[in-house]
Amino acid sequence: MAFTVVCDACVLYPSTLRDLRIRIAQAGLVQAKWTDRIRDFPNATLEAWNVEAVSADDFVLAQIDLDRQRVFAAVQQIADSWRSPPGTTGDVLDRLERDGLLAKPPGHGE
């Protein structure tokens, strides 16, 4: 059963990261709900509901840990949707890296 995530609308940019997050939801890994400002949900309030606020990038990385194959399938779908010029999964991963997905926050090792 997919768990529900509340996404800040700021995750709609950059476009390749947005596409990946939406395709993760379409794959059934999560049920996405959208809000204009996640910062309006302080941790103290979220804890009462057993909910954790995470960055959009940490969300994607958690999905990879949960179901690497479905996330890779979403990356493949993005590549398949690029027509002019056509894309490969490597192109999508390069774009995601350029958009900051692979940037490691402090404390996350090398």
Image (spheres, rainbow, N blue to C red):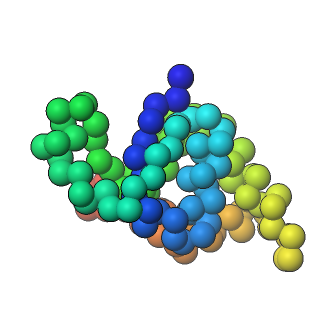
Residue 27 horizontal/vertical position (percent): 66, 38
Residue at the farthest top position: 1
Q: Is residue 9 visible?
A: yes
Q: In which quarter of the image is residue 105?
A: bottom left
Image side of residue 55 versus residue 72, left or right: left
Residue sitting nearer the eye, 63 or 23: 23
Q: Which residue is drawn at 56% across and 53% down?
A: 21
Residue sitting nearer the eye, 15 or 66: 15
Residue 81 horizontal/vertical position (percent): 81, 61
Q: Can residue 59 be seen in this view?
A: no
Q: Residue at x 72, y 44 (%)?
A: 73
Locate the C terminus and report the quarter of the image it occupies: bottom left
Location of residue 95 with respect to 11 vertically, above or below: below
Residue 96 horizontal/vertical position (percent): 58, 66
Location of residue 91 with respect to 109 vertically, above or below: below
Location of residue 84 with respect to 22 vertically, above or below: below
Residue at the farthest left position: 44
Location of residue 45 with respect to 94 vertically, above or below: above
Q: In which quarter of the image is residue 9?
A: bottom left
Image side of residue 23 versus residue 54, left or right: right
Residue sitting nearer the eye, 31 or 85: 31
Residue 93 horizontal/vertical position (percent): 63, 63
Q: Residue at x 54, y 71 (%)?
A: 14
Q: Quadrant of residue 47?
A: top left
Number of on-image labels: 0
